[in-house]
Amino acid sequence: MGISVVERESMAEAESGGERVHIPVLPSAVLAAFARIAPELDGGWIVDGTVGMGGHAELLLEARPSLRLVGCDQDPAALELAGARLARFGGRVELRRARLSELRELVEREGFAPVAGILVDLGVSSLQLDTKSRGFSFQQDGPLDMRMDPTRATTAADLVNGLDEESLADLIHAEGEEPRARRIAKAIVEGRRRAPFLRTLALADCVAQATGRVGGKIHPATLTFQALRRAVNAEHAELELALECVRATLAPGGVFVAISFHSLEDGVVKRFLAARAKQDGWELHSKKPVEADHHERRANPRARSARLRAARRPLALEVSS
């Protein structure tokens, strides 16, 4: 099953001084994984490739006072919030606007070495879902956009209104794992003949009518919106290049942690770590992904579909060809 956006629409928050505070998922598991960083890497850098609102970064900086952190994100709004949250750590923090595909170049160009750890928290963020003008949510009316990086050229509306029926169905099936992709694509093409789809609720209603489903725990447009978001932001390609950064820049004794929210992302990470364990001797944090316990799932709805995989690069490293 793909991501449950309904769960992630429910942004976990706490009240602190009258302000909303984002709660990062799987905090104990993240700290436990990074606790395995080799002592030889004290003073090194953690690369948070998806710093978001800075929740995981804050946890790591507090837990590992000898380490520094470079927080990256393609979303300028997220970087602004992260900067405010992490300001108290002073020179231990550097923030950069970058996509996952740009991490390797950034790390090598700016000399963030040694890389003691790399963290990626994949998928759409609570901030993006909660901002209706970004067009990620099927529960709030907004422009059909879905760009995490607002400088990207293609929006969700471009795909919905521009692709032919077969290509649109293929996209919804491949990127959303939606079994009713053909029926949905046909309904979208018929609907856009009357007027182009420019708003999120109009598209969500079209999908619901095409599937004959309304209400229920999982909205019928969940997988279609997932597919469009992944395509708009080239999420599969971005992740693959991020993993190349991990392989190329993570120091011996360093730790890599990935948090995913649906099977497509988790599968890519699982295969990467299995290959590294077999070919290069990387030490897996656990055989199965770490998931939230029932206490965290109740306190933080976003954690219900979260899966964490991690591994440590061995100190005695023999790189395979």
Image (spheres, rainbow, N blue to C red):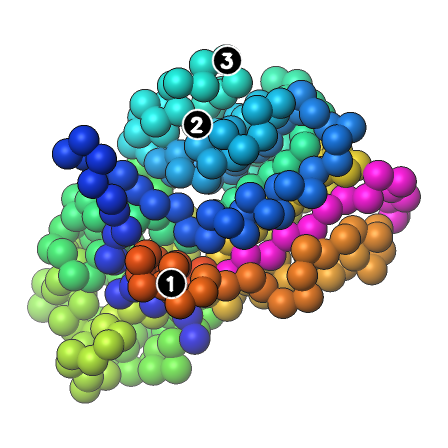
Numbered label attached to residue 91: 3
Dot 3 amino acid type: Gly
Is 309 magenta? The answer is yes
Whether residues under marks 3 and 2 lie with C-beta atoms below 8 angstroms apart, the answer is no
- Residue 19 is situated, as x and y percent measured from the top left of the image, at 18, 34
- Residue 94 is situated, as x and y percent measured from the top left of the image, at 49, 20
Q: CA distance from mark 1 to mark 2?
A: 34 Å
Is 297 magenta? The answer is no
Q: Earlier in the sequence, mark 1 or mark 2?
A: 2
The one of 293 and 1 positioned closer to us in this rendering: 293
Question: Looking at the image, can residue 316 be seen?
Answer: yes
As helix, strand or loop, the secondary structure at mark 1 comes to helix
Label 3: few (<14), some (14–19) or many (≥20) C-alpha neighbours in 10 Å: few
Please identify the residue farthest to the bottom as the structure is shown: 212
The one of 193 and 145 positioned closer to us in this rendering: 145
Q: CA distance from mark 3 to mark 2?
A: 17 Å
The span shown in magenta is 307-321
Q: Residue at label 1?
A: 295
Find residue 88 and report its image quarter: top left
The one of 108 and 266 positioned closer to us in this rendering: 266
Mark in front: 3 vs 1 = 1
Is 71 situated above or below 261?
A: above
